[in-house]
Image (tube, helix red, strand yellow):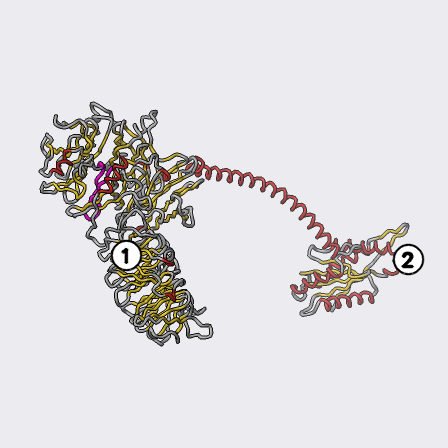
């Protein structure tokens, strides 16, 4: 019954239409955050933002720290003194040093310490708070925090961390619901007995009074909330009497429809107050949602829960309000927290709901039309039509009947009498004065879906799936023309999606290109504009939707292949298109409708959103949630311009764009690390690095996890994130869409890196936010420089030792090998000498053989001077007789005997050789003819005296010797020949003698 009573009270709150155009439709778009997102309890009680930008949410079941993606929960367990003293959180206050004060329902006051990730609980009683139940925490002007409790008001000095109880006086009740210090230093206390004020410099509290009985009812009631706006007004909210405010002059004013009792009925408790943009005060109530009011306005607006709209408040009991540093408005309700982006002002949505007067009757907007009286006609599904009045404050619902009752309404046109013609399943007509609907006004078209209408006096052109029709307003004649396969100048297709006047021409947009008629009377002889494969200057795609022409004569055509542009058009001349599609930045190339703003910039609805194209630079900017765009899908050519607003119909509602209001969130909200785990150990919030501060990873584990977020909280689902560990990663890593952004690394090598984090926002003012954090991974003991230097030195020592040992071994091996080589060399030399000897020595005599002698003698000849070298040629006398008488062995002994005597008489340089058979020869270098003759004579005499024994015989062998001295220029052969001639002379002279060659 109590809930029903509050609902009845909410319904009875008057909400007359505000004066600002569209304000009745432009409601906050609340994003809900509840148990599914991690809240420990659905009833939320308080919201605060700490110094680092994190949002704190108090609930009846615990406290959470929220970065837009993740929640860190804190709850009471009664065992650990560092935990919350009580899970029921009533008040939160963020302190300038990063700590957060927490007022609880039964556990007193605690403060969150970021350095320990725990809480310190203040005592209750002397030296502490006056009671365990904390209602309000308020920041004072200097270093004071004011605390309203169930049994008093306390002051916490942040410099000394001491709490003192404030003396209230006997006329105040012990219970205090709120406390507030204004900019003038006056202290306001919301007491169980009303509102009291202690002027700056005074020590006593005075009740606040007024002559207005309605306001007096508020001031004498329990005061649950107090706030000051930017103009210095003091706003108060009561337990049962609504709200009121006092201006700088001290005069109190009522909030229209929400000050004093409502005909005796009690009003919902005002739990929170928050000033938002344009001086509007949000009044958070216990059961009636938010009442929005700007001082001096005649009316209020109510934002509360609508079961048919997911963007409404999740619950109507509002216990806390906050506007964060980025302009988001946070609302703590009984069914979770709601967040609204107060800066998303470029676009807003008009949504369907059966429970609201200014909402659509059907979610899908198939057609949009603005008539000559500036009324907006919306064609919806199921035969529904909504009409928005020129003041943009009221909306009326109409419905077609008959066969059109359940069909889509897609087209509108206004006839010369101001009547509105409707294209649905056939044609209908509405009298705008009476709003009476006339069905089936053109029987020929009954049952035929009408896609588009164009009035071009005196005709109404009608596009259908079966070609086009021309209706003559003057006589009611209806002419039909369609595509004919045998006529290339007939309509390009029977599906006519849009008809537009371009100068004097009529352009029929079809699913197979554009057919251009010279005027409205023409039903044939069309000029065709189609897509041509391989021709970039042709229409990009034949499925054509909207067509618009700007003041410079450019024609913009929406197709399912992108936005086609004709920069210069003249009837009859060659048409050249250029295309703006996904490659140029559009979210989709399926462009449905195109509208032009005051500066002739085209705005288009595509299959997945709305975009603006700069007509001069061609830059494409896609709208996003940060701009207020929440309807994502558009498939109809439903678009129109109303005043300076652009209207796009979509699946889910109507999008209203303010082209002149381009939301810019600036640089609000930093990209920050909100949690970090190093080697499995979580860092406390106080140890999290800020931009430029390092992360130190110690020797164990080498793992790192960093949770990060862009702390502006605008459209977190549209923000994309990436990260890179510079010095380790070669490329950026994109975080998967829909998952909380986090960077995870394991087994990082030791060293110094830079963790680069990046966030990319979406929308008209898309930007990239980046931040860097140095990362130091400490080395293990065996990775330290000292260890590595020691290892290097040890390695060097080992190498030196090994080299030394190896050298000794190699030297030993070398000596052994050298000895072996020397021995083998000697053997080889001996063998070579032996071979050489064998090759140049006569085996029988042991003297040089003929070949060797000739080589050596030639060398002597080349170097000897004439007369200074001689050759002595010896021949054994009667040697054949010796062989024949005594045998060849004796002959061999004779030859050996002669050779022995020759060696005995030769000098070291003389060359003695067996020249052949019984002939022997001596070459004597550096010897004259006389010297040689004397040596020859000695040999002859010695041989003559030598006896060779053979068995019983003694054999005497003699020789004849011819000697020749070297002459000038003679050859060796000539030289030997002369010695041979001398030898024969000796033979002829009787043998056993020496003769000299002349």
Q: Residue at x 69, y 69 (%)?
A: 970
User: Alpha carbon of mark 2 to alpha carbon of mark 1: how far?
Assistant: 163 Å
- The image shows residue 501 at horizontal and vertical percentages of 32, 70
Snapshot quadrant of residue 421? bottom left
Tell me, yes or no, whether the highlighted magenta stretch contains residue 468: no
Q: Which of 810/414 is in front?
A: 414
Q: Quadrant of residue 122?
A: top left
Label at residue 886 = none
Of labels 2 and 1, earlier in sequence is 1
Label 2 sits on residue: 885
User: 467 or 125, which lies in front?
Assistant: 467
Left or right of 500 on screen, residue 846? right
- At which x and y percent is residue 516? 37, 72
Q: Which mark is residue 387?
A: 1
Relative to 388, 729 lies left or right? right
Magenta-colored span: 268-286
């Amino acid at each position: 019954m109590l809930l029903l009573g509050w609902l009845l009270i909410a319904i009875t709150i008057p909400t007359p239409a505000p004066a600002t155009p569209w304000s009745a439709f432009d409601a906050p778009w609340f994003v809900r955050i509840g148990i599914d997102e991690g809240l420990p309890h659905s009833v939320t009680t308080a919201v605060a933002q700490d110094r680092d930008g994190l949002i704190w949410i108090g609930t009846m079941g615990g406290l959470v720290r929220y970065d837009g993606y993740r929640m860190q929960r804190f709850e009471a367990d009664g065992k650990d003194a560092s935990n919350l003293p009580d899970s029921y959180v009533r008040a939160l206050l963020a302190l300038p040093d990063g700590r957060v004060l927490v007022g609880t329902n039964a556990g007193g006051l605690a403060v969150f310490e970021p350095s320990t990730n725990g809480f310190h609980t203040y005592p209750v009683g002397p030296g502490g708070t006056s009671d365990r139940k904390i209602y309000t925490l308020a920041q004072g002007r200097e270093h004071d925090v004011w605390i309203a409790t169930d049994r008093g008001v306390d002051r916490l000095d942040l410099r000394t961390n001491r709490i003192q109880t404030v003396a209230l006086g006997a006329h105040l009740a012990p219970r205090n619901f709120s406390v507030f210090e204004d900019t003038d230093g006056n202290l306001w206390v919301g007491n169980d007995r009303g509102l009291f004020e202690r002027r700056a410099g005074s020590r006593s509290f005075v009740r606040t009074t007024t002559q207005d009985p309605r306001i007096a009812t508020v001031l004498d009631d329990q005061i649950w909330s107090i706030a000051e706006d930017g103009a210095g007004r003091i706003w108060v909210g009561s337990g049962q009497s609504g709200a009121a405010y006092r201006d700088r002059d001290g005069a109190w004013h009522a909030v229209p429809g929400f000050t004093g009792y409502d005909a005796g009925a009690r009003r919902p408790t005002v739990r929170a107050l928050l000033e938002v943009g344009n001086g509007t005060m949000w009044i958070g109530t216990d059961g009636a949602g938010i009442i929005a009011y700007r001082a001096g306005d005649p009316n209020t607006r109510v934002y509360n829960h609508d079961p048919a709209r997911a963007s409404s408040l999740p619950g109507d009991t509002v216990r806390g309000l906050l506007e964060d540093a980025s302009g988001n408005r946070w609302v703590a309700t009984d069914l979770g927290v709601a967040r609204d982006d107060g800066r998303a002002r470029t676009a807003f949505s008009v949504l369907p709901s059966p429970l609201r007067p200014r909402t659509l009757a059907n979610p899908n907007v198939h057609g949009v039309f603005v008539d000559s009286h500036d009324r907006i006609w919306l064609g919806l599904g199921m035969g529904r039509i909504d009409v928005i009045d020129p003041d943009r404050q009221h909306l009326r619902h109409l419905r077609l009947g008959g066969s059109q009752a359940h069909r889509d309404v897609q087209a509108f046109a206004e006839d010369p009498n101001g009547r509105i013609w409707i294209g649905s399943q056939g044609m209908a007509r509405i009298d705008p004065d009476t709003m009476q609907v006339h069905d089936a006004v053109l029987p020929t078209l009954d049952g035929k879906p009408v896609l588009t209408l164009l009035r071009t006096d005196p005709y109404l052109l009608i596009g259908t799936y079966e070609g086009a029709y021309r209706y003559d307003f003057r006589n009611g004649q209806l002419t039909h023309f369609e595509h004919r396969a045998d006529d290339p100048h007939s309509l390009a297709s029977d599906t006519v999606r849009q008809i537009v006047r371009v100068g004097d021409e009529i352009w029929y947009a079809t699913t197979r290109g554009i057919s251009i008629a010279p005027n409205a009377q023409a039903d044939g002889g069309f000029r065709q504009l189609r897509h041509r494969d391989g021709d970039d200057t042709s229409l990009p795609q034949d499925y054509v939707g909207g067509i618009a022409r700007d003041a410079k004569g450019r024609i913009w055509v929406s197709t399912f292949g992108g936005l086609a542009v004709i920069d210069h058009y003249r009837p009859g001349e060659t048409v050249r298109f250029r295309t703006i599609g996904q490659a140029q930045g559009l979210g989709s190339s399926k462009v449905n409708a195109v509208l032009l703003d005051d500066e002739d910039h085209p705005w288009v609805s595509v299959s997945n959103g709305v975009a603006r194209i700069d007509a001069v630079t061609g830059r494409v900017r896609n709208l996003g949630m940060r701009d207020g765009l929440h309807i994502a899908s558009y498939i109809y050519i439903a678009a129109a311009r109303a005043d300076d607003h652009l209207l796009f119909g979509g699946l889910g509602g109507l999008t209203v764009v303010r082209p002149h209001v381009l939301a810019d969130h600036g640089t609000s909200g930093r990209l920050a690390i909100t949690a970090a785990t190093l080697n499995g150990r979580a860092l406390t919030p106080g140890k999290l690095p800020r931009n430029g501060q390092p992360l130190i990873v110690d020797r164990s584990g080498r793992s790192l996890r960093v949770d990060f977020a862009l702390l502006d909280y605008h459209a977190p689902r549209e923000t994309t994130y990436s990260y890179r560990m510079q010095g380790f990663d070669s490329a950026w890593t994109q975080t998967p869409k829909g998952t909380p952004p986090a960077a995870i690394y394991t087994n990082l090598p030791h060293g110094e890196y830079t963790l680069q984090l990046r966030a990319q926002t979406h929308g008209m003012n898309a930007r990239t936010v980046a931040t860097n954090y140095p990362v130091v991974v400490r080395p293990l003991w065996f990775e330290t420089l000292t260890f590595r230097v020691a290892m290097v030195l040890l390695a060097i020592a080992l190498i030196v030792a090994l080299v030394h040992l190896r050298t000794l071994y190699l030297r030993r091996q070398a000596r052994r090998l050298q000895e072996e080589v020397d021995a083998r060399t000697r053997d080889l030399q001996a063998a070579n000498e032996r071979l050489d000897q064998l090759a140049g020595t006569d085996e029988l005599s042991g003297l040089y053989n003929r070949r060797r002698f000739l080589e050596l003698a030639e060398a002597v000849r080349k170097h000897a001077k004439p007369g200074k070298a001689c050759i002595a040629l010896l021949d054994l006398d009667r040697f054949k007789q010796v062989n024949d008488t005594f045998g060849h062995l004796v002959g061999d002994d004779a030859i050996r005997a002669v050779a022995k005597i020759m060696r005995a008489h030769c000098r070291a340089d003389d060359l003695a050789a067996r020249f052949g058979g019984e002939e022997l020869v001596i070459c004597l270098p550096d010897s004259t003819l006389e010297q040689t003759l004397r040596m020859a004579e000695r040999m002859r005499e010695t041989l003559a005296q030598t006896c060779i024994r053979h068995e019983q015989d003694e054999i005497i062998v003699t020789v004849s010797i011819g000697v020749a001295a070297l002459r000038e220029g003679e050859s060796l052969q000539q030289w030997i020949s002369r010695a041979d001639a001398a030898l024969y002379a000796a033979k002829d002279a009787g043998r056993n003698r020496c003769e000299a060659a002349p």
